[in-house]
Image (cartoon, grey):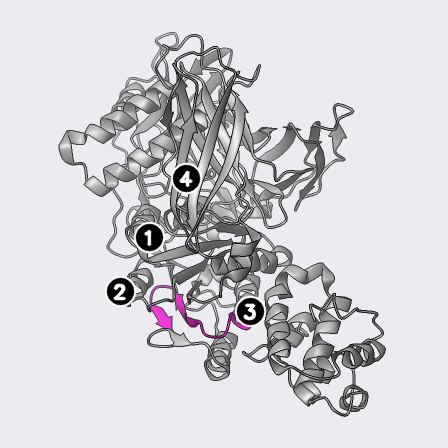
Amino acid sequence: MMMNCCGLLTANKEPVPLKSVEVELEVRAHVATVVSTLNYENKEDKPLEAVFVFPLPGDAAVCHFSAKIGQTEIVAEVKEKQKAREEYDDALSSGQQAFLLEESDQSPDIFSLSVGSLRPGESASIRLEYVTELAVQADEGLRFCLPAVLNPRYQPQGSGGSGGSNVQMTSVPASLVPYSLSFSARVSSPRPVSKVESNCPLDALQYLNTEQTQATVKLAAGHKFDRDVELLIYYKDAHQPTAVVEAGQASAKPGTLMGDPVVMLSLYPEFPQAVMSSVTSCGEFVFLLDRSGSMDGARIKSARDTLLLLLKSLPMGCYFNIYSFGSSYEHIFPKSVEYSQKTMEEALKKVEEMQANLGGTEILMPLKHIYSQPCIPSQPRQLFVFTDGEVCNTKEVINLVMKNSGSHRCFSFGIGEGASSALINGLAKEGGGHAQFITGTDRMQPKVMQSLRFALQPAVVDISVKWDLPKGVSVTALSPPITALFQGQRSLVYAQLTGKSLAAEGCVTVKYSLAGHPTQNQLHFSLKPAEDTGITVHRLGARSLIRSLEMEERERGGERDGEVKKKVVELSVQSGVSSAFTAFIAVNKGNGEAIQGPLVRRNVPTPRLWGGCGPPQSIKMMQGPMVFGGMQSNMRMARGACAPVAKQRMMCDSPPMFQCNSISIEHKQPPRDPLLQLVSLQKASGCWVLDPALAAALGKTSEEVEKPKPALVNQEVWATIVALIWLHGFKMDAQEEWELLAMKAVSWLRAQNAPCVTECVEAGNALLGCNMQKDALGL
């Protein structure tokens, strides 16, 4: 078993110190505050140092960290990272209790929590608070995700990471996770809450007022750690732009970020219909698919089905190519080719054969190769990246996308449990595209097709935000400039308001150019801060500014004596919000008694989902320092203790060495979904052909389909109209998935100028038992 080879749990499941996790979620409109309480207990007969590695949303702002030991509560302070580490080490070596919370150097969505030394039999309770924005989904739900897993991140060979905070991760099968979880959420919004959905069983939604603008919901008892906890929150009329002004803290100095009011704008651009309909679709579509071992099973199947839908929905006259990657990378064509029946068929044949058999997850090399290819004139490049987001060099990958952001748009998809939100969101944000998270096949296709619709929209250029404020009030932007706008898609903008005025209202105008047409959207808002809003918006504004400055620091490579770094540390300390250069540190100076005996290090496992009968990546046993997913960990001992510690090493590589030879499993191809079966038969031009395969997909015999065809109509026109009737008559619930390829079919039919269309629709309705009108089909 994996737990034995990690050396962290004994065969008789000796308990680790974390006993329970309680999570409270407070959602206000589009943003959320999350409070997690982690309860520890040392059941060993010697002092213990516990380390818990856990994931957070990539754009989260950690803003409170405290520890309660017995009756003593210690609240952590934000300090420069190296100083915090030294203070933590000094406290441990002098026998004091210490707690350290820091961001991983490789990825901003992994935090490592060192609980310091717990005396034998002692309990500790850690309280961690963070704020985050909620992403808008394809169906307008707002998504909150509590990751239950942190899959081992794959670190490319030769990249040793940076510095001492390399995070090591331990995973065990979900059924063996030795701690419990309770989760509750409170939602409030200016607009009524229409429903809350989840992938986990929930207790019934309770409304707290008659307007239904406030509600609570809880996770049902008995949650197993077999998935992330995903909440989808739906509001009525969610599409309206809004502004929230939050008052500054009375204790902070006016003129500082925390002392001044901060405004959060939620913008939903509406593009003029005349401009949208006049745009012809073109582009170079490059699909980059993760085929590492962790994508095996349902994930790779889902990705293949999605590529089928994408390839059938591309417009004639565009260019495309498909890359796939693991430890190495492959491409279907040496360079992007024009979309035609021949190239589409060749690509689909290769897609059908794709397996998750390329080893680790090294995304940097294929990205470099794609960016080295010259762009095709008049065909804007659109990059689609599909991955489960398990990489260790997140920041390096995002930097590369940002450097090439002028020549393409990047649309990213996080597939499955444990996808890194820092990677997925970072790719889309820096690439001017859109990010989607897919936690089940039932939600995958509509999300991907929504992104394709965005990619087919013309690129919005020359975006500017203009503030019109009363005399005496000035504005400081906290958000980076907006790089991408899509029809009906939300953009959040944060700004600090300095100074006072008697006037009650401000106005913001977003200007941009769309397909050569200058366009603008305006929003008027009250300058009076809302009452009792806390400081969530301030913290998210600070986080936005900190992330921009961190990116600037990486670009400069620490030039100018770390001036930018100094600014980040200052801002982080002032706002109490975590950054790449700071850490939370708490030391219990207590009664001054030193803790006796050497420290034993225990890593608290996070649940790991295994498909099939073994881990998706192989594990090699060697002597040497312990390595998890390519990250090295050293057992920490109290200073002065020099007892040798037996260490083990675990590495991931491919192909899998775990074989289940004792079990014979026969893999039968499941029957193909009827929708995908019909879609797979469509030609690149948009039409269908009258043949036995089409009849089978419609659940009919060839004779039944051929017989009612009106005499003057050619076979392809008849087949295409029947296919459209079937889609509209039987698959309206999946319309988002087939809408684009149906539009292509309608365009093809119009170009044929075919006779007897009304007659065909009537005959097709009779054949399929439907009652579709010609107009409803777009004819």
Q: Where is mark 4, residue-wise? A: 110
In the rendered image, which quarter is residue 182 located in? Answer: top right
Side of 724 where 70 appears, left or right = left
The answer to whether residue 46 shows anywhere in this view is no
Give the Cα separation between the discs numbered 1 and 3: 25 Å
The local secondary structure at tag 4 comes to strand
Mark 3–mark 2 Cα distance, whole angstroms, equals: 27 Å
Q: Which residues are magenta?
A: 311-331
Identify the image quadrant of the C terminus. bottom right
Q: Which mark is residue 405?
A: 1
Is the residue marked by circle 2 packed among few (<14), some (14-19), or many (20+) residues within 10 Å?
few
Residue for badge 2: 372
Measured as percent of width and height from the top left, residue 3 is found at: 48, 48
Label 3 sits on residue: 313
The crowd level at tag 1 (other Cα within 10 Å; few <14, some 14-19, many 20+) is some
In this rendering, the label closer to the viewer, 3 or 4: 3
Which element type, helix, strand or loop, lies under badge 3?
helix
Residue 314 drawn in magenta: yes
Do labels 1 and 4 touch, CB within 8 Å? no
Q: Amino acid at mark 4?
A: Ile
Q: Nearer the viewer, residue 738 or 228?
A: 738
Residue for point 74% across, 65% down: 776
As measured in the structure, the alpha-carbon distance from the residue carrying label 3 to the one carrying label 4 is 37 Å
Asked if residue 511 is positioned above or below residue 329 in the image, the reply reads: above
Q: Amino acid at mark 2?
A: Ser
Is the Cβ of the residue at disc 3 closer than 8 Å to that at disc 2? Answer: no
